[in-house]
């Protein structure tokens, strides 16, 4: 049976427990002391055996962070985060270094199997063409296994935990780290710079089309742990890579913090396609528990004709604060943002993108589909700007909101700034509601109310789902249905 | 009296209201399998209300009376269960669902009903073949099947699409609410042929219409006049001609 099919079958087998990923894995872990200090930063850096410059970079970030205040402009409301009560590093015991699959704790492998991750080097069959996915799995703070490494190596592609890249390719990491999202960028990104414990590193050499999809799965397991992963992807001239990230976390009564940073660099004629299926634990119906997801993702189209495309399916987290952005620096470069953001229960989503046009003839496209149900709040926040020199900058934005029920909210906050008269920005926005009459019509044809919502919602998000790699589109579609369970009736 | 189990649809003393306003006020109707019943009556007499109450629209409260389909209590079932049990309503005003291709909608509906009845889902190739066949007969193009459900369809196209769904779902009882209104003469013939093709000894029809014209094509076994929430007269197909000639004035008086 192809792995994708298995995943789908597993997603289907959901019963009463709406959050199927809510299991806790019993494994001993190796943690830093509670709270955050220079010593914590030194501890993490030492654990990773990092070079001195990296430790200094982290310490600078840490000192900077101490002077910063949490941003408050987003439409999200949550109690103060007890930074001194959190653990900033947690590794499954005995996993402080990268391992081959055979060395990985079998308990961990079972966890991944439950998550539906094709961690084993097995082929994913989709249609006629054989497609494969290389997976890097990050468990709490540490990368535990990277599959397909050798085969990628033959193509010259580096795909490994960032801690390993710091050891094996320090010059590459040093050249690019923090050049898209500087250590001083914002409160959460700066915190990440100080304490990030792992994440993925990808380098695709000149002219290489990465032979398979690359994928990372993140999972937060430990109680009271923050997860701070940092991903850095570099597509050298004329190269192409498609990368998918998936996230889950067990059910916990407490809130858990996730503050990740993703940096993408696309040089001349290179293309990066970055897809996210985010399914962190959203908290229960009353808003207890759930992940606080404060993420900084940014791509830099540094070269001419470079292209970066973000696709996100956001169904989880209690709080989502996330704006995957593109800096369109190279002439003729192109940025895209396709987003499905679903909120149900008491979830709060403030998400969108920034398209910063700096080069000539740059173009960008934003398709955002927000779905709010239950008592959730869902905000699209977007910025499109064209610099004085960005002649003929083009943007098309389509931002649609769908409401299910009448206790939720949808908000759209678009900012447009054109400093050149040659810029053309188009903006379309709609807000609609699933009507009782539509529901009744579907039910009269035999659909249950939940099937009806899923059908209507899938129709609403179709344009974005089509952007996902095929294997994941099916799973994303199921996820959408699951996350909207209980939204009607 | 023993309930007549051979009755396909049996409505007894049905009272229903919307927002505390009584609309159906003691309605009786029996439809045997194999029969076509026409319901005619003035605007606002409660014809659409009757169809919605049977199908289970939640805006309406049933305050008295009963309705059974093949002996099963309709009011004990959710709307989707009524559909799976064989009740189909061709809407007077079919709804639009943007983004959901007509084909996808048909497939989801058919498979949902099959699942509810414990039958296997129809494999996609067979499904597509089946839809094409039925759509061809109703003059519905492949292009329409790809478009969002009813989105941008003309009034007549929407009605044909209702008949397509009916043909595909093969219900036991078909309630057609003014399926003829908005149809041009050719479309009326196509739709009527579509309905006639579905006539079968184990299937019944309730055809709500304002026009004798439709009944020339779909010849009814029984014609009812509805006024003020009740059936006030029942006759054969000649009753429709009489109504066409004389209007409803007499019945409106009687029912008041
Ligand atoms: N939401 C509502 N609140 C109050 N009255 C309503 C509501 N909906 C329908 N009605 C009333 O119910 C009555 C019956 O309406 P219904 O649509 O069943 O009539 P009909 O016989 O189908 O008419 P037509 O021939 O025009 O289609 C009308 O008087 C209508 O105004
Ligand atoms: Mg009517």
Image (tube, helix red, strand yellow):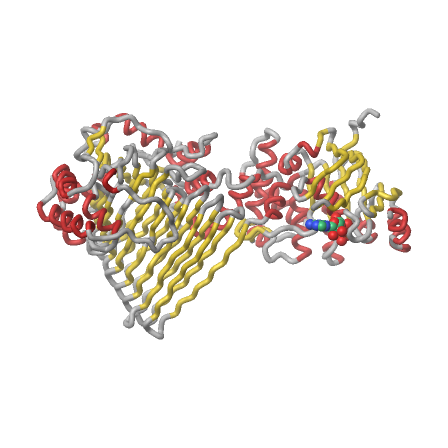
Q: Nearer the viewer, residue A125 or A330?
A: A330
Q: Nearer the viewer, residue A416 or A409?
A: A409
Residue A116 position, x and y percent, is: 36, 33
Name the residue furthest left: A52
Left or right, residue B182 beside residue B224: left
Left or right, residue B246 beside residue A394: right
Left or right, residue A343 beside residue A385: right
Q: Residue at x 26, y 40 (%)?
A: A227
Residue B94 position, x and y percent, is: 65, 50
Q: Is residue A100 visible?
A: yes
Q: Is residue B125 visible?
A: no
Quarter of the image with the N terminus of chain B is top right
Q: Quadrant of residue B236?
A: top right
Residue B153 position, x and y percent, is: 62, 56
The number of numbered badges drawn on the structure is: 0
Residue B130 position, x and y percent, is: 61, 42
In the image, is residue A337 above or below residue B223? below
In the image, is residue A109 above or below residue A305? above
Q: Residue at x 20, y 45 (%)?
A: A158
Q: Residue at x 77, y 34 (%)?
A: B65
In the image, is residue A455 above or below residue A304? above
């Amino acid at each position: 049976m192809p792995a994708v099919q298995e995943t789908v079958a597993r997603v289907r087998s959901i019963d009463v427990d709406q959050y199927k990923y809510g299991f806790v894995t019993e494994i001993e872990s190796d943690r830093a002391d509670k709270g955050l200090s220079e010593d914590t930063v030194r501890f993490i850096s030492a654990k990773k055996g990092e070079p001195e410059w990296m430790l200094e970079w982290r310490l600078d970030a840490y000192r900077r962070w101490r002077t910063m205040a949490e941003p408050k402009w987003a439409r999200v409301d949550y109690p103060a985060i007890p930074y001194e009560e959190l653990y900033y590093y947690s590794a499954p015991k005995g996993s402080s270094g990268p391992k081959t699959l055979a060395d990985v704790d079998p308990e961990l492998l079972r966890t991944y199997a439950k998550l539906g991750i094709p961690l084993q080097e097995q082929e994913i069959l989709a249609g006629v063409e054989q497609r494969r996915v290389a997976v890097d799995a990050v468990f709490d703070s540490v990368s535990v296994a990277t599959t397909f490494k050798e085969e990628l190596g033959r193509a010259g592609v580096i795909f490994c935990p960032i801690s390993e890249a710091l050891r094996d390719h320090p010059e590459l990491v040093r050249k690019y780290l923090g050049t898209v999202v500087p250590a001083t960028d914002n409160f959460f990104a700066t915190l990440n710079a100080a304490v990030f414990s792992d994440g993925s590193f990808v380098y695709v050499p000149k002219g290489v089309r990465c032979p398979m999809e690359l994928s990372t799965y993140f999972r937060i397991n430990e109680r009271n742990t923050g997860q701070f992963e940092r991903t850095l992807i570099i597509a050298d001239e004329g190269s192409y890579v498609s990368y998918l990230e998936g996230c889950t976390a067990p059910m916990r009564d407490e809130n858990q913090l996730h503050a990740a940073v993703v940096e993408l660099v696309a040089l001349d004629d290179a293309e990066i396609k970055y897809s996210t299926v985010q399914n962190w634990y959203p908290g229960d119906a009353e808003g207890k528990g759930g992940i606080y997801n404060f993420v900084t993702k940014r791509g830099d189209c540094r070269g001419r004709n470079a292209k970066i495309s973000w696709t996100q399916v956001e169904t989880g987290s209690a709080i989502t604060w996330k704006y995957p952005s593109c800096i369109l620096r190279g002439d003729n470069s192109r940025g895209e943002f396709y987003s499905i953001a679903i909120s149900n229960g008491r979830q709060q989503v403030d998400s969108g993108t920034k398209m910063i046009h700096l080069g000539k003839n740059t173009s960008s496209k934003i398709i955002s589909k927000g779905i709010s149900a239950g008592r959730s709040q869902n905000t699209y926040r977007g910025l499109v700007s064209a610099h004085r020199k960005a002649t003929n900058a083009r943007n098309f934005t389509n931002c649609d909101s769908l409401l299910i029920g009448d206790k939720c909210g949808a908000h759209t906050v678009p900012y447009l700034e054109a400093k050149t008269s040659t810029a053309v920005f188009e903006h379309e926005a709609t807000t609609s509601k699933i009507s009782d009459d539509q529901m009744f019509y579907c039910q009269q044809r035999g659909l249950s109310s939940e099937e009806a919502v899923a059908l209507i919602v899938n129709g609403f998000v179709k344009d974005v789902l089509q952007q996902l790699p095929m294997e994941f589109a099916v799973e994303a579609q199921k996820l959408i249905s699951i996350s909207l369970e209980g939204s009607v009736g | 009296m023993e309930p007549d189990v051979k009755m396909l649809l049996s409505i007894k003393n049905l009272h229903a209201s919307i927002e505390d306003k009584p609309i159906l006020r003691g309605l009786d109707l029996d439809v045997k399998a194999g029969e076509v019943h026409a319901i005619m009556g003035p605007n606002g007499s409660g014809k659409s209300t009757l169809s919605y109450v049977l199908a289970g629209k939640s805006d309406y409260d049933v305050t008295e009376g009963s309705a059974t389909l093949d002996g099963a209590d309709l009011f004990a079932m959710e709307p989707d269960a009524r559909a799976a049990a064989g009740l189909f309503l061709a809407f007077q005003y079919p709804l639009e669902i943007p983004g959901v291709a007509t084909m996808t909608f048909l497939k989801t509906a058919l498979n949902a009903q099959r699942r509810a009845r414990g039958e296997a889902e129809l494999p996609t190739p067979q499904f597509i073949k089946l839809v094409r066949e039925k759509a061809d007969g109703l003059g519905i193009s492949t292009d329409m099947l790809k478009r969002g459900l009813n989105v941008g369809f003309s009034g007549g196209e929407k009605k044909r699409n209702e008949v397509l769904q009916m043909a595909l779902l093969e219900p036991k009882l078909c309630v057609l609410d003014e399926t003829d209104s908005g149809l041009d003469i050719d479309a009326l013939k196509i739709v009527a042929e579509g309905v006639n093709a579905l006539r079968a000894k184990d299937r019944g029809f309730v055809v709500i219409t304002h026009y004798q014209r439709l009944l020339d094509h779909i010849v009814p076994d029984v014609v009812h006049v509805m006024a003020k929430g009740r059936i006030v007269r029942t006759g054969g197909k000649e009753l429709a001609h009489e109504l066409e000639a004389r209007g409803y004035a007499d019945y409106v008086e009687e029912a008041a």
